[in-house]
Amino acid sequence: DSPPLHHSHDWLRFNLYSKTIEPYSDFRHEDSSVTSSNGSPRPVEAIFSERDAIQVQSKSGPNMKIIAIVQARMGSIRLPNKVMREIHGTPMIELLLKRLARSKELDGIVVATSHDPVNEPLVEHVNRLGFECEKGSESDVLQRYVQVARAHKAEVVVRITGDCPLIDAQLLDNCICDFRQSEVDYLTNTLPPSYPDGLDIEVVTLQALESALERADEKHDREHVTPYIRRSDAFSNK
């Protein structure tokens, strides 16, 4: 038996040990919102268009656009091509994106990779699934995030890393709702660490990201996107 998780959203902990973390083949057939009647993936546009009415009612402001940006690349030194490695026959990035698509609070999902040609198989696979993929700087990931958020006219960004295939959409939605109610610049479930690695979620305004892009000059801050925001007194965090 797994020990209890002490967190303000304890009611979500069942997701960690239920079928939510089982192989993608099981998940795919259980959620009709992301699959067709024969079990094959449905177009992403159809998923989000059907959820528009729910999203508009749940938002604190009718014009607040929230997107998830998934940073991913093929050039990992420790485990090359890890985001395309298969889990029960499904590439890791595909599993992650299909799980994110279960969110009822997101207006879109975009993969943010770099201009390095080694990422082309990733770009092609993401596009084939019906998701958008943007290219940016290899090392300045903060700039990559701002670039993608601006291109998609997002006011709020949910930061997800491409090596988290067990990301939980219900937990993500809960964080977004908490973010809206808190009226902060930045919210995360990692300060203090509350869930196992792989369930990390960060919600941040584009304005905060743009400010960090303008002010942060340390390599670590540019590579890991949010350290400057978490450290600076200029932002309200939760």
Image (tube, rainbow, N blue to C red):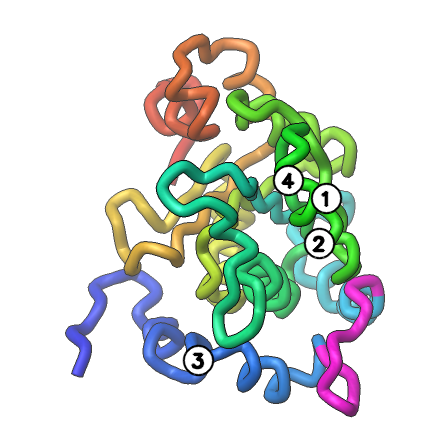
Q: Residues within 10 Å of mark 3 (few under 14, many from 20)?
A: few
Q: Is residue 195 visible?
A: yes
Tell me the quarter of the image containing the N terminus. Answer: bottom left
Cα separation, mark 3 vs mark 1, equals 26 Å
Q: Which residue is label 1 attached to?
A: 133
Reply yes or no: does residue 19 show up in magenta: no
Q: Residues within 10 Å of mark 2 (few under 14, many from 20)?
A: some
Q: Which residue is label 4 attached to?
A: 119
Prevailing secondary structure of the magenta residues: loop
User: Magenta segment, which residues?
Assistant: 35-45
Most extreme residue toward the bottom is: 38
Amino acid on which the number 1 mark rests in the picture? Cys
Estimate the x, y position of residue 38 in percent, counting from the top left.
Answer: 77, 91
Q: Which residue is label 2 attached to?
A: 126
Callout 2–callout 1 Cβ contact below 8 Å: yes
Cα separation, mark 4 vs mark 3, equals 28 Å
Marks 3 and 2, the one that precedes in the sequence:
3
Amino acid on which the number 4 mark rests in the picture? Asn
Q: Residues within 10 Å of mark 4 (few under 14, many from 20)?
A: some
Residue 115 to residue 25: above or below: above
Q: Nearer the viewer, residue 184 or 165?
A: 165
